[in-house]
Image (cartoon, grey):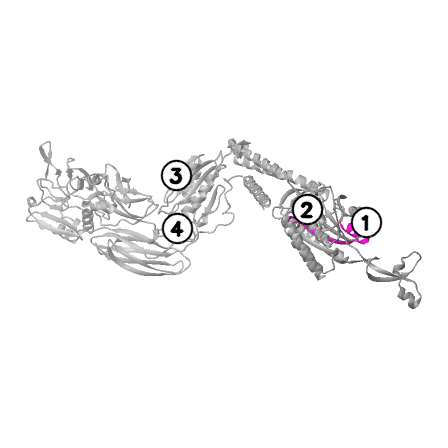
Amino acid sequence: MSLASPERLMWLVVALPIIGFYILKTRLRRRQVATLLFWDQLFEEKRQRSLWQNLRHWLSLLLQLIFVGLLGFAIADPLWQTQSESGQELILVIDNSASMRAVDPATNTSRLEDAVSKAVDIAKGLRQGDQISLMTAGSSVRVVVGMTDFAPAVQEALRDIKATDGPTKVYEAIEAARRLASDSGRRRIIVFTDGCVTDRKALVNAEDVRWVLVGKPQDNLAITIFQVRRSTTDPIGYALLVEVQNLGDEAANARLKLTLGDSLVDVIPIKLAANGTYRKTIDGTSREGGVLTGTLDVEDGLRTDNVAQAIVPARPLVPVTLVSETDSDSFYLRSVLSSIPLVQLSETTDALSLTEDPNRLTVYSGVSPEQIPAGPSLFVVGSGVGPKVDSDDVKVDAWRIGEATESPIVAKQNKESPLLRHVRLQNVVLAGGRDVDVNALIGEPTTLLETAEGSRVLVSVERQEGRLLILAADLDSSDLPLRIAFPVMMTNAMNWFFRETGDMNPALSTGKLVSVPWDVSADNETGVATLIAPNGEERLVTVNNEQATVGPLDQVGVFALLQPASMEELADDDVTLTPQEWLAKNATGDLLAVNLCDASESDLRVPELSSQETTAPPISGASAWFYLAMLGLGLVIGEWVLFNRRVIA
Amino acid sequence: MFDSDFLKRLEYLSLLSKRVFKGQLLAQRRTMQTGGGIEFADHREYVVGDDLRYLDWNVYARHGDLLLKRFQEEEDLHVYVLLDASASMNRGDESSPNKFTLARQIAAALSYIALADLDRVSIIAYDDRVRATMPLMRGKNNVLSLLRFLEALECGGEKTDLRAVVGEFVQRAPRTGLALVVSDLYDQEGFREGVDRLRYARFEPHVIQIHTQEEAAPKLLGDVELVDCETGVAKKVTVTERKLRQYKTLFDQFIRDIEAYCQTHGLSHTRTTTDVPFDAVLLRMMRTAAVG
């Protein structure tokens, strides 16, 4: 046996005053009395009893010294040989999910505070040879403190744990803990949670896992679904799907207040039976868009799930100018453009009279300007000469149009391009189809349609000044305008030009990893975007294939996904801007709404585990005889208090 | 101890006693001894040698019988004060005087009253035997020597034995009389035999018991070693509240036993604690006697 803290044996000197007190106690006070007549009658002692009286004092001293000895050794923290060789690997898993924010009305403490308090108690009992680590299992699994034998570090870290708005990930945390401590014989995982998880039946103690449940059951109303999508019939309309659940055992009433920006949309009274669900689709229109917020007007255990948000994008009118030859009516093109919602179409025959406007789409039908103007442009070209570009002070063709082919049947189609989404043009005869050879000086071309002979009849070009789409075909004599694919393709083109699909990003959920469409700029070389949290915190997210990978987020609210380049000029080191403020400053990007929307997390009814499952962890804490020694000391003190009380009285 | 104030209070008590007892006290009592008194008591047969002056000539003239007149002789009473001077009497506490001091004051007062009534007074100080004796004396002119005797007394001895003392006293006493026993009655062998022997010897015992408040209700708690101040015997005890309650019960029983004994044998018994002044004790004795 070894002692963890042999220096603490100095506490054994406490035995000295005890012996001193004993001597004082055994030196009886002598009192003279007039007679012993009455005392003799009072104490008619037998000899055996008298002997016991004498022994009693010695026994009392012996017991006191034993108590002091036990106490001294307990403080010195003895370790058996086996203990010191096989120390435990203790992993504390703290559930800091949204439900842990629930406050117990009786104690006015949150579940997280209770969990931290219990975890600190266990961390304090760490013994020599043991190791401890700390993990959180909120919206994401995080190792807060790696394996260490320094318990104060864990205690300090425990007090710094903050609750998140995300769902619980205790099962993932347990798996991570098992990877962290690979020795199953020494591993002890203690999970401090309120049991608000998806699969509550899995809350079963394993060989190496003990559950410590915190919190008292509470009723709760929660918005569990809050998603908005674009209306299928109205380009500026939207449809909201909202679901409210009563996660309690009693009926409840509430009002759901819907606002879009600062405007009140609707107030819906809701009556919910016990464990009832309210679900409704609400239609609305808004060209300006904004943040659509749903708020439950109710006071319950968890406030995070009483508010949900979704982003309704603005739908501004798109100015489109059709430039055509004087003798060409461009009937199909005009008709298609006119039929696209939100397009504000104008026509001209004089390409030179156009002013450059990066926010306007210019459609050249059989006409080519001398130079490609800034802004997005659609070229429907025939055999004519195309615009020029500067190359070392020499003007060269921006593209060259090949000879007409005899049977321009589309043989290959770029399926990944958003321009051809929902469009199938293979085996379509594209009359007047010619090969477009784009000069690399104007940008990186992408072939969208290619004939069997290899002619690139539809080419898109990514250009810093504005995207280009070049179609080498004769629309007036082609089958293409007669197909349903043509207006679809033109609508795709409109969205592609302005990097605006009109689709709505779904409201995200905390704790989940999601991909968000990211087609903000042609400059995606960095491969990153900046995510602005509601409190202004910035973090970078990766972008791959025009998809930004976001999450898992641990905070609800409105985020912004911004183009880093657009933020550089607007950034102010002294001021932290919110997502809305960034966009108000014309930073390029989108807003993202993040909600909890997790019925399991909002269900604050703490599950009941069987006695086996709630068994206290057989780890940590001092030895049982430590407490016995403390009890013994308490008895000794009590005995002394009583004795002195008698003497003083 | 016996200052001028004390003497004034003695004189007051003496006067008071005359009014209270009205001729029943001490020297004014008739003895049953016939002799040279003036009050006729009885006749008896004349025998040769009798003083013819006491022959009842009237009876002889009427009946011819020679009868001698007998008269009840008046004589002074003998008062014996048996004063306990054992070590146990040398007890007292801060709030009340020493037991022996009070005992001596009571003895002095009773003696003074007796001397004032022209009775004969003797004081016998004892523990397990007679330690000092003041011989019989008469008249108030002996008060000072009586007080000096009392003042010179000291407590001592290794035990108290009234029985042995009475045995010795009875043999020495020239005549019977009042025997005032002033003591705490803590005889190791019991005081009753001593008092009984006084009764058998035709003395009139009068018991005056003195104890302190501390002895009636000791204030001890915890582990203590009790030492008998007479015998020196020590006893280690652990005194608890319960034991104290039992002690008080025993002491009360001791008092009741003494009272019952005195009542059974027609003895006068006065009990006092040391916090009561001696004159108050005597007044109480007088009232008791007057009522009785």
- Between marks 4 and 2, how big is the CA–CA gap? 83 Å
- Marks 2, 1 in one chain: yes
| Magenta stretch encompasses residue B216 | no
Q: Chain of mark 2?
A: B
Residue displayed at 65% across by 44% down: B238
Q: Tell me which label, 3 or 4, sits earlier in the chain.
A: 4
Estimate how packed mark 3 is, as few (under 14), some (14 to 19) or many (20 or more) residues with alpha carbons within 10 Å: some
Q: Secondary structure at mark 3?
A: strand
Q: Secondary structure at mark 4?
A: loop
Q: Which residue is mark 2?
A: B100
* Residue B3 percent location from the top left of the image: 64, 47
**Three-letter code, disc 1:** Pro
Whether the residues at callouts 4 and 1 have beta carbons within 8 Å, the answer is: no
Q: Tell me which label, 2 or 1, sits earlier in the chain.
A: 2
Residue displayed at 26% across by 38% down: A527
Whether the residues at callouts 4 and 2 have beta carbons within 8 Å, the answer is: no
Q: Secondary structure at mark 2?
A: helix
